[in-house]
Image (cartoon, helix red, strand yellow):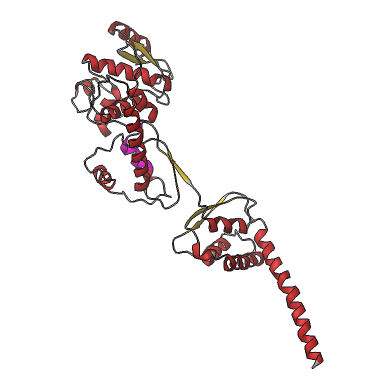
Amino acid sequence: MRKKIRIFGLLVVLLVVAVPLAGAWVSSYLHRPLPVDEPRVVGVEPGEGLSSVLWKLKGEGILGAAQEAEFRRLGARLYSSFTGMDSRLHVGEYQLNPGDSLLALLEKMDRGEVMQRSLTLVEGWNFRELRARLETEDTLTQTLEGLSDQEVMARLGYPDRHPEGWFAPETYFYTRGTSDLTVLKRALERQEAVLEQAWLEREEGLPYETAYDALVMASIVEKETGVPSERAEIAGVFVNRLRKGMRLQTDPTVIYGMGESYQGNIRRSDLRRPTPYNTYVIKGMPPTPIAMPGKDAIVAALHPAKTESLYFVARGDGSHYFSKTLAQHQKAVRDYQLRRREGYRSSPGASQ
C-alpha cells in the first residue's frame, strides 16, 4: 500500500513539474519570430475559423518546419482556448512583418487590427477614368460592373444627377472586401461637404446662380492648370469673360464634348462643331462639370483673382501667360504656341 502511495506521489510531482515545462516549451514557440524575411499579408475569410487559418499558414510555410509548425499550432489553440479569440475572429487582412511572432499575429487578429488599403482618386479625372480605376482594385468587392453611369448614381441615391465632378479626388482608406459603391459614396459625400462649405464662404457678386455652377467652373479650372498658384488667376479670367458676355473658349470643354473620338489633337473643325460642351460655340458654361475638381480648384472658382486679364496661353513649361488685350494674346500665341520647342507641355505632366 505504501509503495502505491509513493508511486502516486511521484506521478503527481512529475505532472506538477512536467506540465508547466511543457506549457513553457509550447509557449516559447508562440513568442519566437516566424520564418518570414519580407512583409506578408494574412487573410481571414468570412466564416473561417482559427484552425483553418493555422492550416493555411502552415501550408504557406509561415509556421516553419513540420515539428515547430505543430508546436505553434498547439500553442495557438491553447491561446484561443484561454482567450476565446476563435469566437471573435475578425475578417480581413493582417500585416505580418519580419520579426513578428505568431503571438503578435494572433493578438492583431484578436483586436481586429485589419490592414488598411488605400485608393487615390486624382484631380482632373473624369467619371469614366474614375470607374476604370475602381475596376482595377482587386481588393474591392466589385458591384458596379455592367451598370450605366446613371444606374450607378441611382444606387447612390441620385438617379437624376449627372455623375461628373461629384466625387472628391483624395486618398481613401478601406479594408479588403469593401465595395466599390462604398468608396464612391464616401467620395460623393466628401465633395458635397467641400462644395457646400466653399459656397457659404464665397465672394459676393460672382456670376454663378448656384453652387453647381461653381462646381462646373472649378472643373474647368482643374483641367486648365495643375499649377496651384495659377488656379485663382485662371478662374479670374473666366469670370471676367462671363461678365463681359464673352465665350469661354477653353479647350478642355471641347475635348470632353468630343468624348472617345478625341485622339490627342483638336482640329479647327472640332472647334466649330457644336456640342453642349464646345465653349467656342456656346455662350456661358457647359451644362455639367467636365472632371473631378479638387478642393483648391473649388476655392479658386469661388475666390477668383481680381485681374484684368481676359486671355491666357500655355507657355510650354506647364505655366501660362496672361494677357489683358487680344493683341497681347495673339503675340503670346505666336511666341509660345507657334514656335513650340522640344519638351513643350500645355500643363504639368501633359505632353503635346
Residue 127: % across, % down: 31, 37
Q: Is residue 263 above or below residue 39?
A: above
Residue 340: % across, % down: 38, 15
Closer-to-camera residue (225/175): 175
Where the N terminus falls, by quadrant? bottom right
Is residue 330 a member of the stretch shown in magenta? no
Q: Main secondary structure of the magenta part?
A: helix
Q: Is residue 186 left or right of residue 160?
A: right
Q: Is residue 5 above or below residue 131?
A: below
Q: Specify the farthest residue to the top.
A: 327
Where the C terminus falls, by quadrant? top left
**Count of numbered circles on the image:** 0
Q: Is residue 336 left or right of residue 23?
A: left
Residue 76: % across, % down: 60, 65
Hey, which quadrant is residue 274 in on the image?
A: top left
Q: Is residue 313 above or below residue 107?
A: above
Q: Is residue 341 left or right of residue 155?
A: right
Is residue 128 a member of the stretch shown in magenta? yes
Residue 181: % across, % down: 34, 47
Q: Is residue 292 visible?
A: no
Q: Is residue 201 visible?
A: yes
Hey, which quadrant is residue 136 in on the image?
A: top left
Kindly identify the residue that appears in the image at 38 percent across and 23 percent down. Answer: 225
Closer-to-camera residue (237/315): 237
Closer-to-camera residue (258/308): 308
Magenta residues span 124-133
Kindly identify the residue that appears in the image at 71 percent across and 73 percent down. Answer: 19
